[in-house]
Image: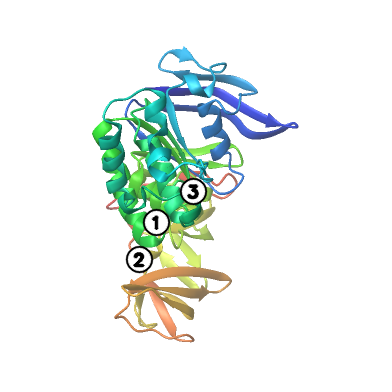
């Protein structure tokens, strides 16, 4: 199923929850809609589901406008944050319910297969009140997956799972979606889910689409400072710098020289990913002087909070490299790791550097 949103706007008392959204979802694609609370991602999903009607614009399933088509006739499967389980039915019957409505054969086999995939086999004869929140969420997911709809619509379906089950469920969900080739729209605020699940990611903020692209494109080529500072944990370092006509820029008390002057506009925003910064001794040539303010130990790596004048930058380092709070250190990086953004608009500036295509 192909889905297309054309100039879709949804207003609530003159406030745009979604503003003039244009989006195409390919047949069989796993599209993740990523954004924080209030970004418009759930409203977008609800309009695709038919639970909300666009104030203006059109939604197409293949080549047919479905604005007035009720949810029950859109051949979609929904999974939301709330479980919406039938309390008087056992788990087996909750999962089997959509199959019985459609008079599907081999109901038992279908239910047992999906229950095994989501670790629910031992719970099939229990009632929802006997389950934990995470178990109820898995049942809701199983009830949607047991069907073979044309479209999956999912709003934070893994939010109540513990970390181990979330990783397992992500892998199984992606595998199942690809096996059945079902168009899937998955809403989340979790970047890890977005980057690991999505064929493409749509990033929204305040009702507006900010960028659409593959996980690689979203992470490595952010189109504006919002995307740069939103994607990544920790996110991209952002700092305002002044470029000179001779090809140098100052960050803190350090002035670094470019091989060639990169831009005519002197005031720009520099962005660089924390993993692209290298912590070195403070007397290292061409390094930026900084002070270590905090170190977060994460096991396989550590995140260092570094002060450079009025700026705090993050650097990710191997945990075997030892630095302590209060240490004076230096930072080095490759010029082709730098991202540039226009200071007035925040929009990405693709500037030529040696070694960057």
- In the picture, measured across the screen, residue 245 lies left or right of residue 27, that is right
Numbered circle sitting on residue 291? none
Quarter of the image where the N terminus is located: top left
Give the Cα distance between marks 2 and 1. 8 Å
Image location (x, y in percent) of residue 17: 64, 36
Colour style of the rendered protein structure: rainbow
Residue 245: tell me if it is visible.
no
Residue 338 badge: 1
Q: Are marks 2 and 1 in contact (CB under 8 Å)?
A: yes
Instruction: Point out residue 283 in the picture as x, y percentages from the top left corner.
Output: 37, 83
The image position of residue 214, as x and y in percent, is 35, 41
Screen quadrant of the C terminus: top left
Q: Are marks 3 and 1 in contact (CB under 8 Å)?
A: no
Q: Is residue 55 above or below residue 40?
A: above
Which numbered disc, 3 or 1, marks the residue that appears first in the sequence?
A: 3
Residue at 52%, 34% (x, y): give it.
45
Determine the residue positioned at 34% across, 84% down. 322
- The answer for how far apart the CA atoms under marks 2 and 3 are is 21 Å
Hey, which residue is sitting farthest top in the picture?
64
Q: Residue at x 27, y 48 (%)?
A: 116
SS of the residue under disc 1: loop
Lower position in the chain sequence, tag 2 or tag 3: 3
Q: Which residue is mark 2?
A: 333
Quadrant in the picture for residue 316: bottom left
Q: Which residue is mark 3?
A: 227
Residue 10, placed above or below residue 64: below
**Whether residue 168 is situated above or below residue 26 in the rendered picture:** below
User: Residue at coordinates 40% horizontally, 64% vertically from top-left?
Assistant: 274
Give x and y (percent) for residue 66: 51, 17
- Badge 1 density bin: few <14, some 14–19, many ≥20, Cα 10 Å: some
Question: Residue 2 versus residue 141: which sits nearer the camera?
Answer: 141
Q: Nearer the viewer, residue 56 or 266?
A: 56
């Amino acid at each position: 199923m192909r889905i297309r949103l054309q100039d879709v706007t949804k207003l609530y008392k003159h406030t745009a929850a979604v503003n003039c959204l244009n989006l195409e979802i390919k047949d069989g694609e796993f599209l993740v809609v990523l954004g924080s609370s209030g970004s418009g991602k759930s409203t977008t999903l609800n309009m695709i589901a038919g639970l909300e009607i666009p104030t203006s614009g059109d939604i197409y399933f293949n080549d047919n406008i479905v604005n007035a088509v009720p949810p029950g006739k859109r051949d979609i499967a929904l999974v939301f944050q709330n479980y919406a389980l039938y309390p008087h039915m056992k788990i087996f019957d909750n999962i089997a319910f959509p199959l019985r409505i459609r008079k599907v054969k081999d109901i038992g086999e279908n239910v047992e297969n999906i229950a095994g995939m989501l670790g629910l086999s031992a719970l099939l004869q229990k009632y929802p009140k006997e389950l934990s929140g995470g178990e109820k969420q898995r049942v809701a997911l199983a009830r949607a997956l047991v069907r073979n709809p044309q479209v999956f619509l999912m709003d934070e379906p893994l939010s109540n799972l513990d970390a181990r089950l979330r990783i397992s469920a992500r892998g199984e969900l992606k595998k199942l979606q690809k096996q059945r080739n079902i168009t899937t729209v998955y809403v989340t605020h979790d970047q890890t889910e977005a980057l690991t699940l999505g064929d493409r990611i749509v990033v929204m903020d305040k009702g507006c689409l900010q960028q659409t692209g593959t996980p690689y494109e979203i992470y490595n080529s952010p189109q504006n400072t919002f995307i740069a500072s939103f994607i990544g944990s920790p996110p991209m370092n952002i700092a305002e710098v002044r470029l000179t006509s001779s090809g140098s820029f100052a960050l803190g008390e350090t002035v670094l020289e470019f091989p060639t002057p990169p831009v005519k506009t002197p005031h720009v925003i520099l962005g660089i990913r924390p993993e692209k910064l290298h912590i070195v001794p403070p007397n290292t040539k061409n390094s930026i002087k900084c002070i270590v303010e905090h170190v977060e130990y994460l096991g396989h790596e550590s995140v260092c909070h570094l002060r450079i004048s009025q700026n705090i930058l993050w650097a990710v380092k191997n945990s075997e490299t030892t630095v302590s709070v209060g240490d004076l250190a230096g930072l080095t990086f490759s010029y082709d790791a730098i991202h540039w953004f226009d200071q007035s608009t925040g929009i990405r500036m693709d500037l030529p550097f040696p070694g960057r295509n």
